[in-house]
Image (cartoon, helix red, strand yellow):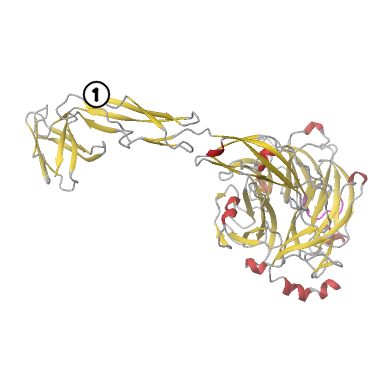
Amino acid sequence: MIKKLLLLSISIFSTMALAQTLCVGGFAGSYPCNGYDLQSHISLSVFGSFGATDSWGWTDPMNGDEYAIVALEEGTVFIDISDPLNPVYLGNLTSHTDPSSWRDVKTYNNHAFIVSEASGHGMQVFDLTRLRNVTNPPVNFTEDAHYNGFGSAHNIVINEDTGYAYGVGTDTFGGGSHFVNIQDPLNPVAAGGYSNDGYTHDAQVIIYSGPDSAYTGREILISSGGGFEIVSIVDVTDKSNPVGISTMSYSNSGYTHQAWFTEDHRYLLLGDEFDESNVGFNTRTIVFDLLDLDNPQFSFDFFGTTTAIDHNGYVKGDRYYLANYSAGFREIDVSDIGNQNMSEMAFFDTYPPDNNASYDGAWNVYPFFGSGNILISDRSGGFFLVKSSESDTTDPVAVCQNAVISLDENGTAILDPSLVDGGSSDNSGFFTLSVTPNTFDCNQIGNVNVTLVVTDPSGNTDSCNSIITIVDDLGPDFTCPSNTNVGYDEGQGYYTLTDFVASGDVTATDNCTVNVVISQDPAPGTQLTEGVYTISFSGSDDEGNTGSCSFELNVMEILSTDDNFFDSNILLYPNPSDEFIHIESGNNNLQTFSLYNLLGQEILNYSFDNSTTEKIDISELASGMYLIRINNNTVKRLIVR
């Protein structure tokens, strides 16, 4: 009844982006709560959306900043929550095809992977590192890659340990699981699928480390079968030959929705999306005992405190975080699940009007942020960020290790704090790392002392020191000219090799060494007769790293400009000229004519039909020296005035 009285006030409240509201007396502002404070809220109107669906999170490995990813009917939005009390809506990625009431997203290797039940949508790939540099939000993003191995999909599951994505409820494999190799995120590759157990509505894929030693280290897929009302266990280690292990069924089934392992992989928590409305009991979680994966056993049913429908649930530590539609988000203690004991510890209700068995309210909850903030996507309420009201006063434990980092091509290096983390820990299971100093340059080659700071979600800290060895292992970057044609020195029977370093035609730059000493082989001044020569250059920087380059020099015997006859009795005149040149042959027919600049680049090229006289237009040529070759015989200089 109280929730219904709050409907008007919440409709006004939810049109804005609101910051922290403490849970006091069972309410955070207008939202019923127990043990959770509202950090911030952004309504759908800010996004210009008619409905929210799935959600997920990303933590930037460079600095620990956290980002919320909320799937909407029209597309996907990205929110900077590094300041959880003042979230920043960064921008939107529009649906690849049409809007849809079903859109889901997961992350891997700093990329988001997005699917939808919209026809032809496929899988969008978005580079999350782009969120670091949004200067004028919100912006309209574009996808960085697209996978079209399937069209529509209900959901996507990712095993981050192996780099494989699993599209489920797709228009392939009979609606079963569609495997995609995403180890190179921007180049997804089809990797097979599994259809033996029919349609898959949702799934979880893990590297198994549970009590059944026969499957230790195997990649195991838990598949929820939707209207087929079963849960299946499949070994997908060999993508070309997935093997079904077993299936599970249960009483009062309606629509098998989603299941999640406990962290020890012993128990499975399953939600059915129709059972509350079909049967009439409170929110039910079905628990299976997976001591033996080949023979799973029903353990017990856990019933919540309301009649609301359960949707997506995830386990972190000894807590089960459940999106419970009209009852909002629920935190459930599973620490004594082995004795068939579960209990609701706290909640935050994002849908105040009622707790009915309907599809209003919280679609998804994301509890995996290191800060302890929890993301909720609500069908009509939009984005919510909440955090436990409990106080943690225990400091984390910082453990350091030494590390080596290399300077980049600019002579700088940024230290990733995880490189000096030697196994730090916190009682919450989550913490962030920072290191000071974290930026280095060429002046700091050698050993540098740094301090690692470990901070837990409640702001408690610990620190330790380590030694970073800065190295420069990049050699100089050389630049050589392209392959070049040259003629003999005037009046000489050879060409004298130029000093290409002194002339500036060959250069070398280095990230740390200002002046790289370059050697030339053959040495400048070497006299070369007709032929093709490889001219090589090399050098090293102050750290002993080497670099090199080379080019081919074609030395040709070139007749002088005052000799109009070629050795083959072909006459060319006038020389110098500025409009036309004439070519006359006596006993030899004309076949080819080629004109080059002094860099060896071909400017003109003609083929003749064994004529004896030709006139060539050179009026468009710039003034300067050119080289002419006729019938592939001896080359002659041409001066254009």
Q: Quadrant of residue 20?
A: bottom right
Q: Is residue 553 above or below residue 137?
A: above
Q: Amino acid at mark 1?
A: Gln
Q: Residues within 10 Å of mark 1 (few under 14, many from 20)?
A: some
- Above/below status of 567 relative to 641: above
> As drawn, is 343 to the left or to the right of 368?
right
Q: Position of residue 72 (x, y in %)?
A: 65, 61
Confirm whether the magenta stretch covers residue 624: no
Name the residue beneath numbered marker 1.
Answer: 527
Instruction: Quadrant for the C terminus, please.
Output: top left
Q: Position of residue 69 (x, y in %)?
A: 66, 56
Q: Of 465 and 420, which appears nearest the observer?
A: 465
Q: Is residue 486 left or right of residue 283?
A: left
Main SS category, magenta section: loop
In the displayed structure, 531 sits above or below 168; it is above
Residue 126 in sight in this render? no
The magenta segment: 251-258
Q: Nearer the viewer, residue 630 or 85?
A: 85
